[in-house]
Image: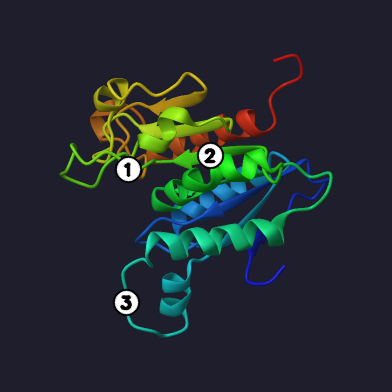
Amino acid sequence: MPDFLRDTPADRVRARFLFAHGAGAPMDSEFMDAISAGLCGRGIEVLRFEFPYMAQRRSGGSRRPPNPMPQLQDCFRERVGQAAEPGVPLFIGGKSMGGRVASLLADELFGSGDIAGLVCLGYPFHPRGKPDKLRTGHLLALECPALVVQGSRDPLGNAEEVAGYGLPDSIRRHWLEDGDHDFKPRRASGFTREQHWQSAVDAVAGFILPPAGS
């Protein structure tokens, strides 16, 4: 599989997660590394990739903003085709912008049988400082099974804001108390960033590989 950063379990691969990065950090950021390693330890193979603008940065190009959304979607759709393997359930998602791109493709790919579900880690429900510019329209009619893991004080969609969006019950939500957009809590909360990252891993693993009988 070209251009993937792959975390493969030592035992058999029970499912695969195609994991896209956010707008500002690459596929091997500390956040991406931690989540990928945690899921790999739970029997889930994680495939990471970079959108064209980020790959250009890595090869020595200038620091550019993300590609237009249609180009990001085309890139993600191509990666799905490369990651698909008969008999291995494929889930797609990402950190922030990566999750948003995946969410825009989710129903199309779920309807065609290419993916089994969607995972968004820190979904950008609105741009920073612009709570009226919502990115929720497509989510209201989403049919693909989905999980959103969100810090309760995320500046791109906190717990109070999200409660008023009218999201369907089919979109599971896992809240990380006092977590910000990277799931980091304040010291006074009694939680640590690493605890929240582990909680995120537990939630995602439970969604991708639900316990028997659940």
Question: Could you tell me which secondary element the residue under label 3 belongs to?
Answer: loop
Give the amino acid at mark 2. Val
In this rendered view, identify the residue nearer to me: 78 or 38.
78
Q: Is residue 7 visible?
A: no
What residue would you read off at disc 2? 119
Give the amino acid at mark 3. Arg
Q: Residue at x 46, y 33 (%)?
A: 148
Q: Is residue 86 visible?
A: yes
Is the C terminus in the top left, top right, bottom left or bottom right quadrant?
Answer: top right
Rendered view: 41 above or below 145: below
Rendered view: 168 above or below 40: above
Q: Residue at x 39, y 24 (%)?
A: 167
In the displayed image of the protein, which residue is found farthest to the left?
Answer: 129
In this rendered view, identify the residue nearer to me: 197 or 70.
70
Mark identifier at residue 181: 1
Q: How far across and down, in percent of the image, does residue 7 sit? A: 67, 56
Q: Residues within 10 Å of mark 1 (few under 14, many from 20)?
A: many
Is the N terminus in the top left, top right, bottom left or bottom right quadrant?
Answer: bottom right
What residue would you read off at disc 3? 63
